[in-house]
Amino acid sequence: MKDPKKILVIRFSSMGDIIYTTPVVRCLKEQIPGAEIHFLTKKEFSYIYQNNPDLTKLHILKDTLNETISDIRRENFDLIVDLHNNLRTSIIKLITQIPALTYKKDRITKFLILKLRLKHLIDPRHLVERYLDAVKTLGIKNDNKPIDYYIAKDYSLNDFLPESHQKKFVAFVIGATHFTKRLPNDKIIEICKQLNLPVVLLGGADVKDNAEIIKSACGNNIFSTCGYTNLDQSVFLVSKADKVIGFDTGLTHISEAFNKPLASIWGGTTPDLLGVQPYKISDSFIVGVDLDCRPCSKFGLEKCPLNHFNCMKNIPTETIVSFING
């Protein structure tokens, strides 16, 4: 394929999946001289690319698909790189008739892994590498650099943290969309009580009460920002942390952009199924319990299907403490 000069990359959701598209955008920009790289996503995820210097223009998915298609037609793209591969992107490609390269999702394989436990079918490669497969016919090669996130503002730690937590601290991401991705409060408390550095808890308003329980149990070594900072501010705090602990959630994945030692804790989901194990960071530690019932879902559930939640209740906290204190 002749080098296209104007490329639209599409990924509508979610936070973690979109952050892992950033190496694709970077490689396209750096390896195709003079190319314009555009990105189309949902409004709620636009922050991931708003400050990315590799992007020529950010496009937002409109209320109707017809509006979005009209916007795409006006831009006269040479190529669509479809990293979502769902019904809406298929319609966009069909109606616009723009040449397209598409990420292969392997839905059937994931179904077989989940339902029939055929774990030998898992592709061990990271999602970034699978995304890059979609553009390899352009001669694009993996530059083996980390993901990208560009913080929107010039924040100061004084804006968010007390003096006791401004020098060296551990960022602990305690939020996650689904229950089966979250470590229970008592396990978080068990970890925090043994850490040598001050701990900053990060998460949304949905875990604000959890954070207060943890803080009450652990004392002044804990400071909570849960429900008080927006995502960009939370990313800033992660970027200033000495080390990071987190679950399978967007903020944890974004933290990889700053190459911090990361303890990545997994419950009902598994990184090998999704291909979202820590990517290109120098020091990471994946924590999970080997159970026949894992993974119980691709994206997490509101409760344990077997009502025991052993994937999180049996997490070996001493290994996490040793990694962070080491």
Image (tube, helix red, strand yellow):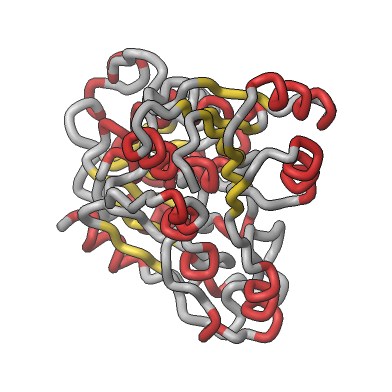
> Would residue 198 be seen by someone viewing this image from the given angle?
yes
Give the residue drawn at x 28%, y 39%: 258
> Would residue 214 be seen by someone viewing this image from the given angle?
no
Measured as percent of width and height from the top left, residue 19 is found at 47, 41
Measured as percent of width and height from the top left, residue 36 is found at 46, 26
Image vertical order of residue 121 relative to residue 38, above or below:
below
- How many tags in the picture? 0
Measured as percent of width and height from the top left, residue 304 is found at 68, 68
Give the residue drawn at x 44%, y 36%: 202
Image vertical order of residue 68 relative to residue 211, above or below:
above
Give the residue drawn at x 69%, y 26%: 72
Image vertical order of residue 240 relative to residue 297, above or below:
above
Closer-to-camera residue (254/62): 62
Left/right of residue 275 with respect to residue 116 in the rendered view: left
Closer-to-camera residue (44/30): 30
Left/right of residue 139 with respect to residue 175 in the rendered view: left
Question: Which quarter of the rendered picture does the C terminus lie within?
Answer: bottom left
Measured as percent of width and height from the top left, residue 38 is found at 53, 28
Closer-to-camera residue (133/128): 133
Give the residue drawn at x 58%, y 67%: 268
Q: Tell me the quarter of the picture where residue 99 sits.
A: top right
